[in-house]
Image (spheres, rainbow, N blue to C red):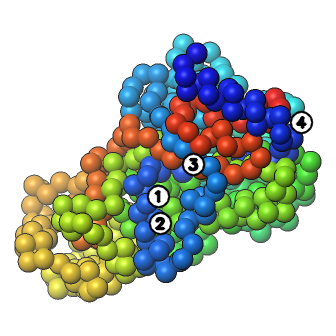
Amino acid sequence: MNLRKLVSVFAIGAAMTVSASPRYIFYFIGDGMGMGQVMSAQTYNRLALKQTAPLLMMQFPYAGMLETYSASSTVTDSAAAGTALATGRKTNNGMLGVTPDSVSVTSIAETLFGNGWGVGLVTSVAPDDATPGAFYAHVPARSMTYEIGRQAAESGYQFIAGSTWRGFKGRDGKETDLRDYMESKGVDLVTSTDEARSSKSDRVFLYSAEPFNSGNVGYTIDSIAGALRLPDMTAAAIEHMERVSPDRFFMMVEGGNIDHVGHGNDGGTVAVEVVNFNEALAEAYKFYERHPDETVIIVTADHETGGMSLGNGNVGYTSYMEYVPAQRMSKDMFSNRMKEMLAGGNVPTWDEVKEFARANTGLWGVVPVKERQEKMLKDLYEKSVSHDGSNGDEKSLYASYDALAAAIYRVLNDNQGFGWTSGSHTGNPVPVYAIGDGMEVFGTLLDNTEIAPMLLKIAGK
């Protein structure tokens, strides 16, 4: 046994001798949330929102770091990372809830559910996506969304919430029988938090009737009317778990939108999404305050996305988070609107494009634009309106961005003070924050396979 694991074992043993096992476990996962994302959000929280207290997760008494590599790569995908966080076992990228040779492995949620605990899962992306799926599904490929949805129905879990179930439609775009199958297992399918709260069923699956951009509930910064919000879903889930399993329950809450906008290198939206994730955490913390001796909370991430930094070569030794409130649209929403404008019969003038950008990003308003930056953007605009095919849209894992919109957001990021090294995941370590009796064991450097076993030991399982 290596020294780090030996220290962890001794720490767990010491913790268990002085504290009773918890009855409530909250496992928060910020998808793609590295220290760059956390510090960007914290600086935005301090300078733009004028909050004197740090983000709640940063106030937790125990803090550590997590390695995230998978069995097949130094840079993990969400399926392998989710499997490690949920089961304590490494697997290959793309595989979910199984070992590299496709043998099923048991998640912490499945173990606790089998011991009489209630289980609730909440995410801002699809509930059959990699991270939530790792807590109930066992498939060789994360793309098997229909099979993943059936396994969710078979899990027995009392609450699952997120965007929409991608398995509701087959590869041919036609409706599958997944809705009927879920209902046959006693699941009440609802599309609002009000419906979730009023449901009389023990099993509730809350999903978005109109998901945004490849399966998330919509970005906080876009203020989409009627969109599900992670803090509200988390609060509804806690209420449901208190009703159906008041003695003991496990909840996993994922801030999946952090990863989606990280792939798009949209710094302002990342900062706002991490704050939104922190607000969801506050719902669990309210519960903790009512049950401090019986509740534990851990916050971490499956991996880092984008190689995000606070600060870049354009702004030097500073950043301008006070510019972020002037950004009123995500890069995704802005790009969609830009595509509509440029494809319409009345093509906007350059001044109209500038005004649209000023109103929705702050550029040419509170965010200054350098002469060389404006020249580059205007040249790209002229190519766009002349339909010169040399522009080329920018593509990320979850979206395709109009070339002009992508360039506008690169300038916005540069001038706000965000830096990026990639449009994909990185192998950077991610943070761990924890609170509750026995949780001091997480205040060190860990591997992502160590969290689930350590939580189970703390829970006496």
User: How far across and how far down the image is residue 390, in percent?
Assistant: 10, 55
Contact? badges 2 and 1 (CB < 8 Å): yes
- Separation of marks 3 and 1 at Cα, in angstroms: 13 Å
Whichever of labels 2 and 4 marks the residue nearer the N terminus, that label is 2
User: Taking the image as drawn, is residue 442 in sight?
Assistant: yes
**In the drawing, what numbered circle is on residue 42?**
2
Question: Of the residues under marks 4 and 3, which one precedes in the sequence?
Answer: 3
Q: Nearer the viewer, residue 336 or 455?
A: 455
Q: Is residue 64 left or right of residue 392?
A: right
Query: In percent of the image, x 64 and y 54: which residue is there?
Result: 61
Name the foreground residue: 258 vs 44.
44
The kind of residue on which mark 3 rests is Ala
> How far apart are the two marked residues, 2 and 4, measured between alpha carbons?
38 Å
Q: Quadrant of residue 133?
A: top right
Going from N to C along the chain, the mark reached first, 2 or 3, is: 2
Residue ID at (47%, 34%): 68
Residue 34 placed where, x, y %? 44, 49
Q: Which mark is residue 38?
A: 1
Q: Amino acid at mark 2?
A: Gln
**Image quadrant occupied by the C terminus:** top right
Q: Which residue is mark 3?
A: 63
